Amino acid sequence: MSVSSWKREHFEEGPDLKLFKTRFDFMNNPRNGKTEKMIILESVDSVNVIARTPEKEIIFVRQYRFGIGVETLELPGGLVDRGEEAKGAGKRELEEETAYTGAQWVSLGKIASNPVFMDSYIHHYFADGVQPDGQQQLDDGEMVEVVKIPEDEVYQLFLEGAFHHPHAVNALLRYFVHMQKIK
């Protein structure tokens, strides 16, 4: 018996939570034969962008996060619209949140948003050489401050634990590894 031999007996739709739809999967545990009701948050994928200016500054957004009740320093990003490519969503979100555009784009990969109870992924991109050529267009529920931080300071802030959003932490880790590889 392997841990992948869990079987879904049936499922029920749950409430729509604006950013997520809920689903209840009734899963049979092969170890003991018992059925457990598991909650799944269904969502489209997300994207975030490490945007670097020609002056080697990384663009961040400071915004209030309702879950923890504090402002956080994060990477620009958001949800991928249905039918949209992740890279296109990254370009759109970067401009909408920061007014920065352009650049050479490199994929830094993707990671599961939270595999415990979510069915979506977060795609990470590095955009090098961005310029403030666009127009900021925030959603009604957004209020962000655009913050530029020199690249070497970003690494120090990373080591100090200054970034609270796990998607930003993962993207920055991938970025630092990417930069080491190309040196």
Image: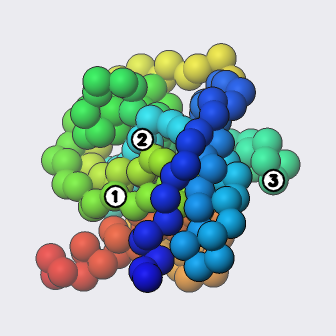
**Residue 133 sits in quarter:** top left
Residue 178, label in figure: none
Residue 68, label in figure: 3
Which of the two labelled residues, at mark 1 and mark 2, occupies the earlier sequence position?
2
Type of the residue with mark 1: Lys
Q: Is residue 171 above or below residue 153?
A: above
The residue drawn where x is 79% and y is 42% is 66
Q: Position of residue 131 (x, y in %)?
A: 30, 38
Q: Position of residue 46 (x, y in %)?
A: 44, 42
1 left or right of 90? right
Q: Secondary structure at mark 1?
A: strand
Residue 110, label in figure: 1
Whether tag 1 and tag 2 are in contact, CB under 8 A, the answer is yes
Which residue, given by chain and number where applicable, does mark 2 sit on?
Answer: 45
Q: Is residue 84 above or below residue 110?
A: above
Q: Is residue 50 visible?
A: yes
Which of the two labelled residues, at mark 3 and mark 2, occupies the earlier sequence position?
2
Q: Residues within 10 Å of mark 3 (few under 14, many from 20)?
A: few
Q: Position of residue 80 (x, y in %)?
A: 39, 33
Nearer to us in this view, 7 or 59: 7
Q: Nearer the viewer, mark 3 or mark 1?
A: 1
Q: Position of residue 56 (x, y in %)?
A: 33, 61
131 left or right of 65? left
Which of the two labelled residues, at mark 3 and mark 1, occupies the earlier sequence position?
3
Q: Secondary structure at mark 2?
A: loop
Nearer to us in this view, 32 or 140: 32
Nearer to us in this view, 112 or 98: 112
